Image (spheres, helix red, strand yellow):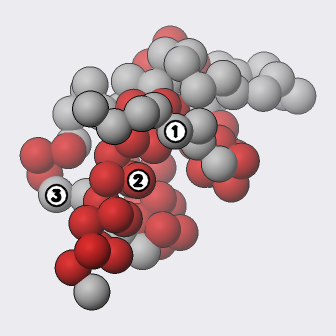
Amino acid sequence: MQQEQIPEQQFIDIVQSHLKYLKAGEQLQAQQQLKALGLDSMAAIDLLLDIEDTYNVVLPDTYLTEEHFSTAQALWAVITDLRSRVESAS
């Protein structure tokens, strides 16, 4: 199994911008539950679009699950996996 990687700050900033219950000035921790911080289905769609634009990836429907969007760490694991697949395919 691949070792968990720490999400980069740019990614954390993107995720934070979609969390309506994260207090101003508070830094998102990689294991915090995103749903508890206000990530609802509409915010998740906006977050998905921002991630796809920023990281030049497309998340297949199989990754659009509550589990993958549960924490920044879980979502970062999806992004790093997709990016590594794209790099090894080219």
Q: Determine the CA span between mark 3 and mark 1.
A: 21 Å
Q: Determine the CA span between mark 2 and mark 3.
A: 14 Å
Q: Please give the name of the residue rendered at 47% of the width and 59% of the height, measured from the top-left corner.
A: 51
Q: Determine the CA span between mark 2 and mark 1.
A: 8 Å
Which labelled disc corresponds to residue 5?
Answer: 1
Give the percent coordinates (x, y) of residue 5: 52, 39
Q: Which of marks 3 and 1 is nearer the N terminus?
A: 1
Which labelled disc corresponds to residue 60?
Answer: 3
Residue 35: tell me if it is visible: yes
Label 1, secondary structure: give it. loop
Q: Which of 86 and 1 is in front in this view?
A: 1
Which quarter shows the C terminus?
bottom left
- Label 2 or label 3, whichever lies nearer to me, is 2
Q: Please give the name of the residue rendered at 42% of the width and 33% of the height, measured from the top-left corner.
A: 3
Q: Is residue 58 above or below residue 64?
A: below
Give the percent coordinates (x, y) of residue 82: 30, 60
Q: In this view, does 23 lie above or below 5?
A: above
Q: Which of 48 and 76 is in front in this view?
A: 76
The amino acid type found where label 3 is placed reads: Pro
Label 2, secondary structure: give it. helix
The amino acid type found where label 1 is placed reads: Gln
Q: Give residue 31's quadrant in the image.
A: top right
Which quarter shows the N terminus?
top left
Q: How many marks?
A: 3
Q: Which of 4 and 47 is in front in this view?
A: 4
